[in-house]
Image: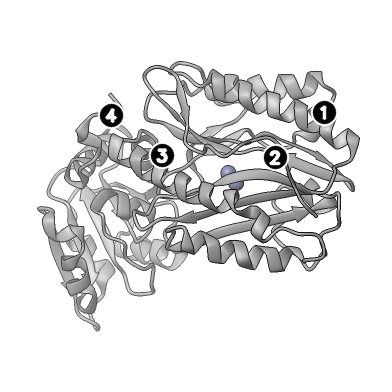
Amino acid sequence: MAHDASHSSPADRIARARIAARVAGLDALLITPGADLRYLTGYEALPLERLTCLAVPVEGEPFLVVPLLEQPAAEASPVGALDLEIVAWRETEDPYALLASRLPSGTKRIGLDNHMFAEKVLGFRSALPGVEQALAGGVLGELRMRKGAAEVAALLEAAQAIDKVHSAMEEWLRPGRTEREVGRDIADAIIASGHTRVDFVIVASGPNGASPHAEVSDRVIQPGEPVVVDIGGTMPSGYCSDSTRNYCVGRPPERYETLYEVLLHAQKEQCDAVAPGITAEQLDAVGRDLIAKAGYGDYFIHRTGHGIGLETHEEPYIVAGSPLPLEAGMAFSIEPGIYLPGEYGARIEDIAVCTEEGGERLNLTSRELRILAG
Ligand code: ZN
Ligand code: ZN
């Protein structure tokens, strides 16, 4: 089901979004530039102050409102190949009123994309008085979290690119260098590996590793310190990479090695447990229980993972309290971590895809602690 071709064509995606909007009790979806727009139309528009907005009424035909000066760019994008009317507005026109006038009469409830600028949300509120505004994220998230074969292939390509960067880590990660210096080299390598954008670079040495979202600092990396390296970027396809590995320049502390074995085992068990039908919370518990049994329960302070696609963080979230059963085509990170405040931390992260048969990891570099020569 997840790998059928119907997920791959934007034309089908708009049709599916319209059905999902109807089910959600919405009369129309309004989607401004961002991952949702790119998913539905292939159009990678910049989120600027002028209004660009895809309208998908439940009754009636979808249309794309664009500033007149953006019309050539929209037509040159994959939108040109879609049967989608482009409605261009002139610099002195009110684009909100223009869009509102084209929505079917009787529109009572509209779904706005979750990342719409507040100024646009309020623009629609004024142009559509009495129309209830709701988030479209649930509707779009439901569609986007079930990936087709072409999307899984794009995620694999992204994973292979970021794997290349991890494989060459010894070129940059050395004691005596600061996290920031190492991070700069890694960012260059992320681009050289085929990404068009660096989304984040975390080089967290020693005690900084105990903070899951530490980025880089001017701290000088010391011999024998564990270093958490979590990196990701966006490929020309729009799909993202995200992978964490752990390094140590010289011998790590003995207690760290014990902790690392626990984490390695938990992450492997979680990857092995991926299969259609297991729920997000069950998958989370597979790793959490093992880590708790080893005495580190209080130090695994975040969810197991997040979905990934056109955004680094999207549905489905692998988290306690989510009864969502996994399905073939869902892609997400598995990234348990153990963080000892003031000492160090470790996190192992792979992107996994749920398949008909079970699960598949897209990141394939070794997950063992990599000891680099000092
Ligand atoms: Zn990550
Ligand atoms: Zn992640």
Q: Amino acid at mark 1?
A: Tyr
Tell me if residue 211 comes above or below residue 275 in the rendering: below
Q: Residue at x 77, y 51 (%)?
A: 373
Residue 331 percent location from the top left of the image: 44, 34
Q: Quadrant of ligand 2?
A: top right
Q: What separation in Å lies between label 2 and label 3 (alpha carbons)?
A: 29 Å
Q: Which residue is mark 4?
A: 3
Q: Neighbour class for label 3 at 10 Å: few (<14), some, many (≥20)?
A: some
For marks 1 and 3, the one nearer the N-term is: 3
Q: What separation in Å lies between label 4 and label 1 (alpha carbons)?
A: 38 Å
Q: Residue at x 23, y 42 (%)?
A: 13
Q: Which residue is mark 1?
A: 296
> Mark 1 against mark 2, which lies toward the viewer?
2
Q: Amino acid at mark 2?
A: Arg
Q: Amino acid at mark 3?
A: Gly
Q: What separation in Å lies between label 4 and label 2 (alpha carbons)?
A: 31 Å
Give the structural element (helix, strand or loop) at label 1.
Answer: loop
Residue 329 percent location from the top left of the image: 37, 30
Q: Which residue is mark 2?
A: 347
Left of 246 or right of it: where is 326?
left
